[in-house]
Image (cartoon, rainbow, N blue to C red):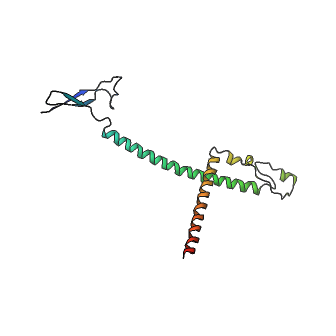
Amino acid sequence: MATETKTEQPSSSSAAAPEPKGGEGDTVATTTTTNAEGASSSTAPPAVDQATMDQLTEAEKTLQDLVTKKKIIDKQLATVEASIYALEESYLTDTQQYGNVVRGFDGYLQGRTDKKKYKINEADRLFSQSSVTYHRALEIKAREEEYSREEEEMYTHRKKKQRRDD
């Protein structure tokens, strides 16, 4: 015949056992079971209660939402930086004959009509270079373009294969 007694003991803080969430004065339920031979065994409460699991689940959901938002914002940033890059290239190309903010306006003063196209140096990209994430944004944009190009090639290849099979 087994008897079971439940006791509630105030929790105490000790170096060996971590204090349950809630602080001093909390009670910890302990179940003691005594079997027919008189031996007793004790079971401690579960390490993580339901409230903690709910908080953990909510924190994981919040983290996942924030990671999703960060990915969206990163894509938007990459798009804006690629746009700045393209506009900057357009500006530098269109204004190279007479001068611009980066190289100066000597062309206006000298009255030259040099139609020669100069290669745009990375050092001339004053606006793009001012961004810390500029290079990363270009890499992301290049990967996206490569991915879409590969998808288009696969689609074209499938269409050609279907025509041959028909």
Name the spot of residue 55 as percent of width and height, x first: 36, 41
Name the residue located 54 percent from the left edge and 50 percent from the top edge.
73
Name the residue nearer the viewer: 139 or 99. Answer: 139
- Residue 18, image x, y percentages: 35, 28
Image quadrant where one finds the N terminus = top left
Q: Could you say where residue 12 lies in the image, as x and y percent from the top left? A: 30, 24
Which quarter of the figure has residue 52? Answer: top left
Number of marks? 0
Quadrant in which residue 40 is drawn: top left
Q: Residue at x 35, y 24 (%)?
A: 16
Q: Quadrant of the C terminus?
A: bottom right
Outermost top residue: 15
Does residue 166 sit above or below 55 in this rendering? below
In the displayed structure image, the side of residue 95 where residue 128 appears, left or right: left
Residue 158, by quadrant, is bottom right
Residue at (62% x, 47% y) in the render: 136
For residue 14, side relative to residue 107 (left or right): left
Q: Is residue 31 left or right of residue 107?
A: left
